[in-house]
Image (spheres, rainbow, N blue to C red):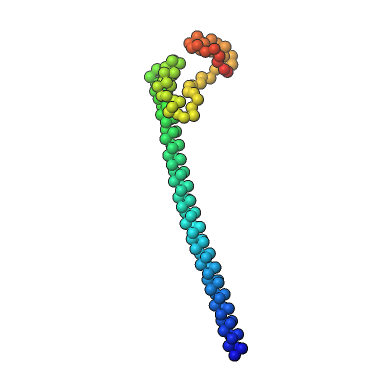
Amino acid sequence: MLNSINKGSIGLKRFIGFACILLIALVGFFSFEIQKHFESERSKDLENYLLEAEQLIVVELNNYYHGLQGMAGVYTVTNYQPTLKQIHEYALSRQFFENFKGVFGFGFIRYVRDEDYSNYLKIVKNKINLTEIKK
């Protein structure tokens, strides 16, 4: 009788052990599947967010690009010799501070050699009323 109880309890122990292993495997499997699902959702959300950001950046860059194309038009129409007034009027017409968030100014730069700087200042000061021109 002792043998049958021992044999029976060994079988029961094996069954309980097998059931525990199976339960642990199922919990692990479902945990993995749930984690994979949430990572996939997060990945989709991130991908959508990045696509929206990319589209916004492209729109803003195109706005700046069109502004520069317009400035090229000012140069073309004036035979590449626009006056400061023409550039200023163009800049006002574009409403840069409203249309191009973050822009602090608009203009062009001419290279002036050090030896020509004082002469350049005289010419520019005669054309416009500036109290200070920074080098």
Q: Is residue 117 above or below residue 13?
A: above
Residue at the (59%, 16%) spot, across then down: 114
Task: Give the percent coordinates (x, y) of residue 43.
Answer: 48, 50
Residue 12 or 78: which is nearer the viewer?
12
In percent of width and height, residue 45 lies at 46, 48
**Direction bottom: furthest residue:** 1
Residue farthest along the left direction in this orientation: 77
Q: Is residue 80 left or right of residue 20?
A: left
Q: Nearer the viewer, residue 66 or 19?
A: 19
**Residue 68 place in picture, x, y as percent:** 43, 26
Question: For the point 40% across and 17% down, which residue is it?
Answer: 78
Judging depth in this view, the residue of 117 and 92 nearest the camera is: 92
Q: Quadrant of the N terminus?
A: bottom right
Residue 68 visible? The answer is: no
**34 in relation to 67, above or below:** below
Count of residue discs: 0
Q: Quadrant of residue 5?
A: bottom right
Percent coordinates x, y for residue 129 in the rendering: 50, 11
Depicted 52 relative to depicted 108: above or below: below
Quadrant where the C terminus is found in the figure: top right
x 59%, y 81%: residue: 10
Confirm whether residue 97 shows in the render. yes
Give whichever of 11, 57 is nearer the camera.
11
Which residue shows up at 48% across the image and 12% down it? 128
